[in-house]
Amino acid sequence: HLVRNEQAVNTDKSEFAVSVIDGTAYYTGEADAGNKLGASVYGWTGRPYLKVHQSSLDQDLHILGSPDILGAELNSPDFHVGPVATPDNGRTLYITRTYIGKELGAEMEKGRKYRTHRLELYKYVQQDGKWVGTPFEHNDPDRYSVGHAAFSADGQILYFASDRPGGLGGTDIWYSERNANGAWSTPINAGAQINTPGNELFPAIGADHNLYYSTDGLAGMGGLDVFFASGSKGSWTTPVNLGYPLNSSRDDFSFVTTIDDDLQQIGFLSSNRTGGMGEDDIYSFVFEKPQPEPEPIIVVLQGVVTNKNTAERISDATIVLYEGERAIVGRESSRGNGEFEFLLEPGKRYQVHGSKEKFQPDSASTHSLDIVASDTLRVALALEPEYSIGKTFVLENLYYDFDRHNIRPDAALVLDELVQIMNENPTMKIELSSHTDSRGNDAYNMALSQRRANAAVEYLISKGIARDRLEAAGYGETRLINECANGVQCTDEQHQANRRTEVKVLDI
């Protein structure tokens, strides 16, 4: 927690009990002697009477400033006024004030002894542009105090502090429910879970719907401490002390929250702790809530290796995992059931290559680019039995741009697999043949296919394959694998099938 003294409003007098209503902060404080409402003093202490003040509130920095005392409609001159609560965002105000009848002996008020009149609640509504107050129907200032109002989020339950008969001792938290006609039901004690033989004061319902209140009847750090409990009415969890630095060895009370979300809790409290500006001061607090570590994204690649001709599972195949530009990031052997598994990183492209002696290798591409949660990817590799003289296979996915013979980057990846085959079979000699579709001049297609075959062979040579192991052959459109001959209407996909590169084993 970061706790800060609100020096813009605090003085050497007493300030406490902030309520934020419709973006404005209201608090209780001793009136300045220069103000007509502060001209009279409280006889027992020789200090000014408590009055309701208002202050600007910086919504971003959560700093109070520009304090001003409210007018006489809410602040009667000759007795204490405050704190303020509202069930409806300021349309109605419930204000604690002292009873102006017969003066009584010393009584508890906000944790300190004053010679005072008893407390009572007044309800204020505006009539003809002026605040008009009426007493709360359950006041009985000749017998007991009622004050420190707080409301449930829906405004239907009123909590307050009172020493009315039937409590557990001292001042307790009580509650009353709003009836259908708008009146408040007979108060009920909030129960022994939160009340003690000591004094419970300043209830508040936080933005998190918990009850916050101060008591000197539970073990704490000294004086009044702030506790919280979950529940409502007369059913509560065990109170929890808010601890340091919200509580201190002195009186800590009037805890209110103004923001309570997943990231932080922000609000105000009052205290006469050491280091303040005098008497009770208002403090703001900010608590940055610890954030849970994000769930790790686990991406699993599961694969299986089979015999391309028989579909049988192949064990002990070498499986190599490449990331990005052919960087090896994993290697393992397929298990007895032909399966293998790798852990991948999110946001990357991968290629899986499978090989085994006496089989042609196979590869598959996959990626984890769009994965935002743990997932399992799957690939299947099919290895064809080893090469024999005269065997021909097509280099899958080796494409050329239309009317071009240069080696594209994606074609280079396919030729790299052929380089690996040649390295794994060092006595193999091959014919690398290129074929075109039927579109265009026959002679031109023949020359184009020869250039393509030559380009592929030159690429293999650049990767270290001996020239005498390679032959380049261009067949143009003489070996079509479908009916798409000259003059036949075919789709682009059908023509693409004829634009292929084949490898024929000449010797091994």
Image: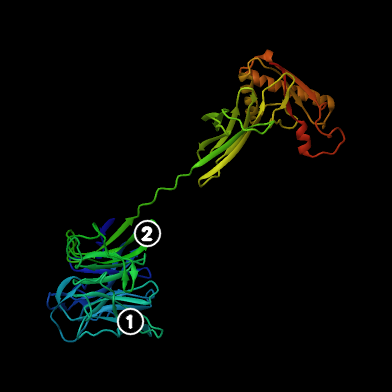
Crowding at mark 1 (Cα within 10 Å: few <14, some 14-19, many 20+): many
The image quarter containing residue 480 is top right
Whole-percent x, y for residue 370 in the image:
55, 44
Residue 347's mark?
none
Whole-percent x, y for residue 447 in the image:
79, 23
Give the residue type at disc 1.
Tyr
The quadrant the N terminus occupies is bottom left
Mark 1 element type: strand
Q: Nearer the viewer, residue 183 or 318?
A: 318
Mark 2 element type: loop
- Residue found at the far right of this picture: 487
Check the image and tell me how it is coloured: rainbow
Residue at 12% x, 80% y is 105
- Asked if one can make out residue 52 in the rendered structure from this viewpoint, the answer is yes
For the residues carrying marks 2 and 1, which lies nearer the camera in this image? Answer: 1
Residue for badge 2: 60
Whole-percent x, y for residue 314 in the image:
61, 30
The image quarter containing residue 32 is bottom left
Crowding at mark 2 (Cα within 10 Å: few <14, some 14-19, many 20+): few
- Residue found at the far top of this picture: 468
Q: CA distance from mark 2 to mark 1?
A: 30 Å
Horizontal side of residue 118 vs 452, given as left or right: left
- 422 up-or-down from 157: above or below: above
Give the residue type at disc 2.
Asp
Residue for badge 1: 124
- Asked if one can make out residue 347 in the rendered structure from this viewpoint, the answer is no
Counting residues from the N terminus, which is met first, the one under dot 2 or under dot 1? 2
The image quarter containing residue 378 is top right
